Image: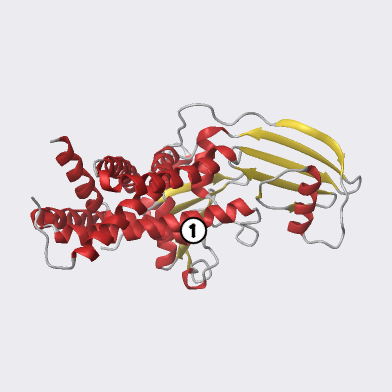
């Protein structure tokens, strides 16, 4: 039977309960990242990739407002076309506006003819694995000025941030809990030390520090 | 006996990967918040440009030519974006976390222009998160530096470790009858949230 040190049982039990329940809460998200990472690292998907583009509609009349900025104009266009998703960027050309839109599982490419005020919409399914990749990388560092223009993207950012904070807590609480179990403390600290040495060893060579 | 081994796997694998978890958690946080002022790195970069002479040894292929130049100049990194222009110029980029090298040469000349870009620690963190030498949709981009492979294997190992820790954790929780009710609530909440984003939003 494991022998515990003196810190109050209440604190130990609280930390252990938080470790268990926060771990359970975060576990599906951690698995999402754990599964998607090796596939991204090896550019391989087991089945059903991205489908071909399908033209959903052409020459849809669009009402444009001239005094709007790129993002607001794009939102207005999407609202009229009843398309929801995260606007990736807005490419304003002389006579056209190109608006790529993505949401988990589907992407759209909207091209607006500014002279005729008409929109052509293409759509395609991106498949289950690409959905995971999209969520793994979302919202991401690119086009920071407009990123989070769709509410679910902002919610996903909050969720992922929360998972990160939970992971940091889980690792810290795990270290705390192992120091309380005399029978496992030594092996636990050796494992932490081995991980630290591995990490530093790889980084020293990768970064060319020495 | 099974419970004891699963308990040990959860604890010891989790503890081994603690530092890796911290790195990817923190770097992931930075990637999702590119506007955090304290973590800016690109505007803080240092650039150094210089010319060097080189000796072509008749390499076959752009990648071999780039690798030969790097060896001659004692540069290291993952070669990226190799381009040969119609006017004879040859350009490539080599990357390692915190350090980017851009080399441009005219194949009719025996000199090259080298630009070295060095970022601060935040830049290193950013690139460590996604440094794998490959990219979906670009089959020509392959890993060519052994340390890139080492880092990728470390990342894959972390993912396997996390999967083991998560599944063993779920098993260990299930073996605690007193915590099942609240645990089911926590697990279902997390699963529901994941389900909405993976399946319902598409």
Asked if residue A207 shows in the view, the reply is: no
The secondary structure type at the circle numbered 1 is helix
- How did the renderer colour the structure? secondary structure
Q: Position of residue B95 (x, y in %)?
A: 43, 54
Q: Residue at x 73, y 43 (%)?
A: A83
Q: Quadrant of residue A22?
A: bottom left
Residue that badge 1 annotates: B31
Q: Position of residue A81 (x, y in %)?
A: 79, 43
Where is A66 relative to B195, above or below?
below
Q: Residue at x 83, y 52 (%)?
A: A94
Q: Residue at x 28, y 44 (%)?
A: B173
Which residue is more in the foreground, A51 or B111? A51
Where is A96 relative to A177, above or below?
above
Q: How many marks?
A: 1
Which residue is more in the foreground, B183 or B131? B183
Q: Position of residue A188 (x, y in %)?
A: 15, 54
**B107 displayed left or right of B53:** right
Which residue is more in the foreground, A113 or B141? A113
Dot 1: chain letter: B
Asked if residue A99 shows in the view, the reply is: yes
**A202 displayed left or right of A184:** right
Question: Extreme right residue here?
Answer: A116
Classed neighbour count for the residue bearing mark 1: other residues with Cα under 10 Å, few (<14), some (14–19), many (≥20)? many
């Amino acid at each position: 039977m494991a022998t515990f040190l003196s810190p109050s049982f209440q604190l130990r039990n609280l930390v252990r309960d938080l470790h268990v329940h926060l771990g359970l809460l975060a576990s599906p998200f951690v698995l999402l990242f754990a599964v998607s990472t090796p596939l991204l690292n090896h550019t391989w998907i087991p089945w059903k990739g991205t489908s071909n583009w399908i033209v959903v509609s052409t020459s849809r009349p669009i009402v444009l407002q001239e005094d709007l900025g790129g993002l607001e104009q794009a939102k207005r266009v999407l609202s009229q076309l009843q398309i929801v998703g995260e606007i990736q960027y807005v490419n304003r050309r002389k006579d056209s506006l190109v608006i790529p839109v993505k949401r988990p599982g589907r992407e759209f490419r909207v091209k607006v003819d500014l002279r005729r005020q008409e929109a052509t919409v293409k759509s395609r399914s991106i498949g289950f694995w690409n959905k995971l990749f999209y969520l793994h990388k979302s919202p991401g560092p690119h086009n920071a000025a407009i990123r989070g223009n769709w509410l679910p993207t902002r919610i996903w950012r909050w969720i992922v941030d929360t998972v990160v904070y939970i992971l940091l807590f889980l690792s810290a609480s795990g270290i705390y809990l192992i120091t309380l179990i005399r029978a496992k403390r030594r092996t636990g600290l050796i494992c932490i030390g081995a991980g630290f040495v591995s990490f530093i060893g790889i980084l020293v060579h990768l970064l060319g520090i020495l | 006996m099974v419970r004891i081994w699963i308990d040990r796997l959860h604890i010891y694998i989790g503890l081994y990967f603690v530092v890796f978890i911290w790195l990817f958690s923190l770097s992931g946080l930075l990637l999702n918040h590119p506007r955090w002022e304290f973590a800016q790195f690109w505007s803080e970069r240092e650039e150094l440009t210089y010319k060097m002479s080189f000796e072509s040894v008749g390499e076959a292929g752009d990648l071999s030519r780039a690798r030969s130049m790097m060896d001659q100049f004692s540069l290291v990194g993952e070669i990226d974006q190799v381009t040969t222009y119609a006017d004879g110029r040859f350009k490539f980029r080599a990357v390692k976390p915190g350090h980017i090298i851009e080399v441009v040469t005219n194949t009719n000349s025996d000199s090259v222009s080298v630009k070295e870009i060095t970022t601060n620690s935040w830049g290193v963190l950013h690139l460590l998160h996604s440094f794998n030498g490959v990219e979906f949709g670009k089959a020509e981009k392959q890993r060519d530096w052994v340390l890139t492979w080492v880092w990728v294997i470390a990342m894959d190992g972390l993912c396997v470790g996390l999967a083991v820790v998560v599944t063993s954790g779920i098993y260990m929780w299930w073996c605690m009858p007193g915590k099942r009710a609240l645990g089911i609530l926590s697990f279902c909440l997390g699963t529901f949230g994941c389900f909405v984003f993976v399946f319902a939003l598409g």
